[in-house]
Amino acid sequence: MDFALTEQQIAFQDAARAFATHELAPHAAEWDEREEFPLEVIRRAGEMGFLSLYTPEAYGGLGLSRLDAAIVFEELAAGCTSTAAYLTIHNMVSWMIASFAKPDVAEYWVPQMVSGAKLGSYCLTEPGAGSDAASLKTHAEKKGDVYILNGSKMFISGAGSTEVLVVMARTGGPGPKGVSAFVVPADAPGIQYGKKEKKMGWNSQPTRAVTFDNVEIPAENLLGEEGQGFTFAMKGLDGGRINIATCAVGTAQAALNAAQRYVQERQQFGHALADFQTVQFRLADMLTELIAARQMVRLAAWKLDSGSPDATAYCAMAKRLATDLSFNVANQALQLFGGYGYLKDFPLERHVRDLRVHQILEGTNEVMRMIVARHLLKD
Ligand code: FAD
Ligand code: 2MC
């Protein structure tokens, strides 16, 4: 067992840190304030390979492991949580199309997603189907060589600014076995986008409802076979949950770094804050929890890479633990900044706002516990 990063991993980490420092961090507050989706920077991330970290090399992706990707996403999130998190969703969508679409469909979309010419969204959640995703009602009916799609999706990241959607829709009876997944061009006639949602965080990426009104899509855009869509959606989310977790860790690290500097500069009662033992102990706990979170994420990524039968449960454990611990670390860092932590002049309040949703999306932390408990109790 070797916990050290390889030379290649360190090189990717350095490249991601440089990109985060120069291209993301200087603009993150402005993108948050103006609710701006930084498309140009996202395309430059494509030039660096960050849009296709674990997309197979056959389609022009880097073909990295989930562990390698987690190391990169962690660094990017330290620069801008919200933008890095969108990059992870794009990576998930690109991987799903590359892995499960018919070769012609994958060959059309994936290379364009690698370069950033086309961006992707993942459409599972509906107004009436969130945690209970298998109860989704969006419907796809086969008519000759097309499917006709009707229904609506809620909370779709990137929607309105992306070019391709992976949509989970019902082709069969109730429950997970009746769900199929489709590649849908985002500008297909009959697709409508809702208003850009006003959110607490994740403001550098749009979130919208999407409605499908008799949207016609070629039958060949079905991923795999009818009825496999729920499994594909869940396989995508196994990796997605590692990504959301690692973005939380990267953000918490940025918050801890800021707090570590601040407590050594800020003087009260004639001393630097860092001289008080309660402050020291708080920092010690923050660092300990952050490292525990990071190691849990990397263990889960390694489980997924090695095809371990318990990988799904580890991804869920990592997502739950890392997002809870990272939120607490960022919140503690804000506390150490006192009133200044609450001001938008400093990044702490943005870190806290951005991290809050990591406990909710890609499966709430209650759903993560459900997955872990089912795994624990199944025998
Ligand atoms: P609900 O499922 O209604 O849950 C409400 C509460 O009840 C939660 O606390 C939940 O944990 C709890 N709960 C539910 N069932 C149980 C149970 N059995 N036991 C105990 N507690 C339970 N979805 C996409 O498909 N694509 C996206 O790109 C996407 N992006 C998002 C971006 C943002 C900013 C947000 C906020 C959401 C996004 N989502 C996306 C949706 C997200 O995945 C859902 O919000 C999430 O899965 C929870 O679903 P819900 O909001 O319907 O909550
Ligand atoms: N990998 C492969 N297959 C899986 C799987 C996984 N990780 N998880 C489930 N499956 C299969 C499972 O094996 C079963 O097939 P079979 O009967 O052949 O064995 C089938 O899928 C149904 O699984 P369950 O019986 O576990 O289904 P259930 O309806 O009980 O719910 C649950 C599963 C709660 C885990 C799922 O609905 C879930 O993850 N809910 C949360 C929804 C969610 O995460 N939404 C995120 C939206 S995306 C987002 O937020 C973004 C920001 C992008």
Image (tube, rainbow, N blue to C red):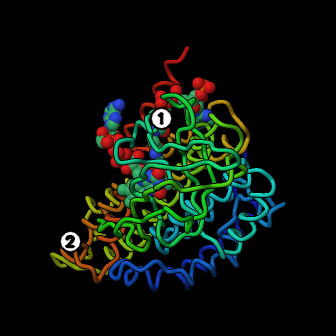
Q: Is the residue indicated by label 1 positioned so its CB lies within 8 Å of ligand 2?
A: yes
- The residue that disc 1 covers is 134
* Up-down relation of residue 173 to residue 316 (above or below): above
SS under mark 1: helix
Residue, disc 2: 338
Residue closest to the eye, 182 or 346? 182
Q: Position of residue 339 (x, y in %)?
A: 18, 74
Q: Mark 1 or 2 closer to N-term?
A: 1
The C terminus - image quarter: top right
Q: Where residue 246 sits: x, y (%)? A: 53, 57
* Total numbered circles: 2
Q: Left of 305 or right of it: where is 354?
A: left
Residue ranking furthest to the top: 379
Disc 1 packing (10 Å; few <14; some 14–19; many ≥20): many
Residue 7 spot, x, y in % from top left: 77, 65
User: Quick one: SS at disc 2?
Assistant: helix
The picture places residue 298, in percent across and down from the top left corner, at 61, 49
* Residue 326, visible in the rendered structure: no
Residue at x-position 54% and y-position 56%: 215
Is the CB atom of the residue marked by disc 2 within 8 angstroms of ligand 1's nearest atom? no
Tell me if residue 27 can be seen. yes
Say few, some or many: other residues with alpha carbon within 10 Å of mark 2 (under 14 / 14 to 19 / 20 or more).
Answer: few
Three-letter amino acid code of the residue under disc 1: Ala
In space, the residues marked 1 and 2 are separated at their CA atoms by 44 Å
Q: Residue at x 52, y 28 (%)?
A: 173
